[in-house]
Image (tube, rainbow, N blue to C red):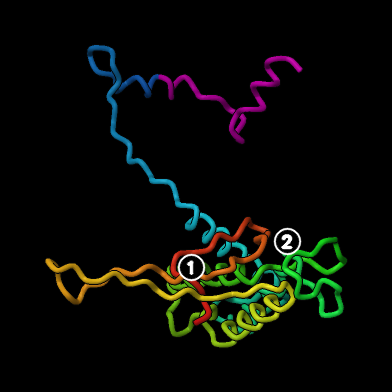
Amino acid sequence: MDSTTSDNDHRPPGGEGPSSSSSVSSTAGAAPGGTADKQPRASVAPLSRYESQKRRDWNTFLQYIRNQRPPLALAGCGGAHVIEFLRYIDQFGKTKVHAPGCAFFGCPNPPAPCPCPLRQAWGSLDALIGRLRAAYEESGGKPETNPFAARAVRFYLRDVRDSQAKARGIRYEKKKRKRTPPSTGGDAGEHSSTAAVLGGGGGSGSSLPEGSTTAPPGGSSIP
């Protein structure tokens, strides 16, 4: 391939390179000394890992409801639709969940492989719902109509947690919040506390169509 073809491949979709008039206009604002005027550009701070993941998860859910037949509007989503979404993404999990008839049922460290399916770990689903719940309200949704905060969704996550704990032989415990004593020189009503952290983790993580699931700040969706 000659150099002309190579240059055309890197041109914008219009196929036309910069014209001579644009070159002239770019130098029209040059100062008498020959140095072009430099205008400050506003720098955009990059999104954090959590915000980036939240955006990907939100786009994944919106694409999921658009692909329904008939397409489902966000305003018509309820807890049942969220549970269907969680069941759909279960196929992309990477956590081995032993079936009741498996010889390794309840074994946290099985000594050999087994044909049991891979599922989304409870911790990953819980973190996902936390991000989607926040994204819904950031997109203008009202907290009282948030389908990701529905009671049915909390019950579903609780069932997943309990069933996976039995199947994998692990325990999910919610650690108590640690409070530091108030300082003598400050307001006695002010206390600093750490956020509730779930013990046991979420297994080997998850693999959603739009990326990984990193736990959000704020702890579990299950009280």
For label 2, the crowd category at 10 Å Cα-Cα, with few meaning under 14, some 14 to 19 and many 20 or more, is some
Quadrant of the rendered image containing residue 121: bottom right
Identify the residue at horizontal 60%, vertical 86% (top origin): 155
Instruction: Please determine whether, in this image, residue 57 is positioned above or below residue 1.
Output: below
Secondary structure of the residue carrying tag 1 is helix
Identify the residue at horizontal 53%, vertical 80% (top origin): 222
Residue 163 in picture, x, y percent from top left: 70, 80
Instruction: Please determine whether, in this image, residue 195 is positioned above or below residue 53.
Output: below
Q: Nearer the viewer, mark 2 or mark 1?
A: 2
Residue position marked by numbered label 1 in the rendering: 135
Reply yes or no: does residue 80 show up in magenta.
no
Residue 99 in picture, x, y percent from top left: 82, 76
Secondary structure of the residue carrying tag 2 is loop
* Residue 88 visible at all: yes
Quadrant of the rendered image containing residue 179: bottom left
- Report the magenta residues as a range: 1-23
Instruction: Please determine whether, in this image, residue 118 is positioned above or below residue 212.
Output: below
